[in-house]
Image (cartoon, rainbow, N blue to C red):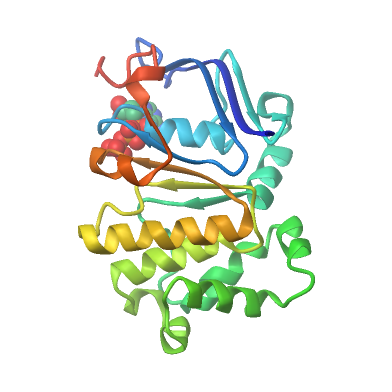
Amino acid sequence: MSTCVELKQLQFTWPGAQLPLLSIPELTINRGERILLRGASGSGKSTLLGLIAGIHTSGPGQVKVLGEDLASLSQHHRDRLRANDIGYIFQQFNLLPYLSAMANVTLACQFAPARRKRLAQQSITAEAENLLTRLGLTSAQQRQPAHQLSVGQQQRVAAARALLGSPALIIADEPTSALDQAHRDDFIQLLFEACDAQQTTLLFVTHDATLAPLFPRSIELSDINHGSGGRDV
Ligand SMILES: Nc1ncnc2c1ncn2[C@@H]1O[C@H](COP(=O)(O)OP(=O)(O)OP(=O)(O)O)[C@@H](O)[C@H]1O
């Protein structure tokens, strides 16, 4: 099985901090895996995701994504890898409020030539519609401005935006924190189905331990992190 994410001897210290927040000897995520990463609030989950997505650069150690050692890439190449191959679902969704749900989704392909190329056979709009429908938004909701949608609907739009153009890796940073249990489990099932249809790897981060049984593999950040994990502040 090929590898999607490979961390080796990773260390990361925020400027001004006394101790490294993260010190992770090893973590490997295979392609197609669905993996839950759990950790307490402030333990470094979002920081780790930012390192894997190439938003922050690490100190010593290696972060490899899809075979590329991020430290050896220029900022431009890291940005391109992220746009083309990583779909990011943010905690606050980061939708543009006055654009329609559909326009928010299709925008994802604007700066991602490889994603557009993977959609070559069908139009971007048709595939966005397909994904939004599969994730449970009606045609009317797809045309509505994002700020007029419920939190659960906005979350589905954010998921469709991340999935459009079949990126190899989806990173989901606590996307269900604002939902009740029924909507949360329903959203995760839909996300699994969409990831399976595209053979996408899913790295899902949460502080909620009750989500672990839904995932084939679950990791506690404190079990793999020898750094401070936010305990020095
Ligand atoms: N830009 C930054 N500059 C300096 N320190 C930061 C920065 N971002 C985060 N930190 C610190 O890093 C630690 C971990 O933060 P991080 O957001 O990665 O945790 P988290 O596990 O995702 O938390 P939560 O579950 O609350 O979102 C915290 O102590 C935080 O103050």
Q: Is residue 162 visible?
A: no
* Foreground of the two, 40 or 215: 215
The structure residue drawn at horizontal position 68% and vertical position 34%, both measured from the top left corner, is 1
- Up-down relation of residue 32 to residue 73 (above or below): below
Q: Where is residue 90? Give x, y as percent.
A: 42, 51
The structure residue drawn at horizontal position 79% and vertical position 69%, both measured from the top left corner, is 120
Quadrant in which ligand 1 is drawn: top left
Q: Is residue 211 left or right of residue 167?
A: left
* Foreground of the two, 33 or 144: 33
Q: Where is residue 81? Give x, y as percent.
A: 69, 43
- Up-down relation of residue 73 to residue 22 (above or below): below
- Up-down relation of residue 38 to residue 194 (above or below): above
- Up-down relation of residue 140 to residue 102 (above or below): below
Q: Where is residue 30? Give x, y as percent.
A: 60, 34
Q: Can residue 46 be seen in this view?
A: yes
Q: In which quarter of the image is residue 77?
A: top right
The structure residue drawn at horizontal position 59% and vertical position 61%, both measured from the top left corner, is 197
Q: Where is residue 228? Give x, y as percent.
A: 33, 14
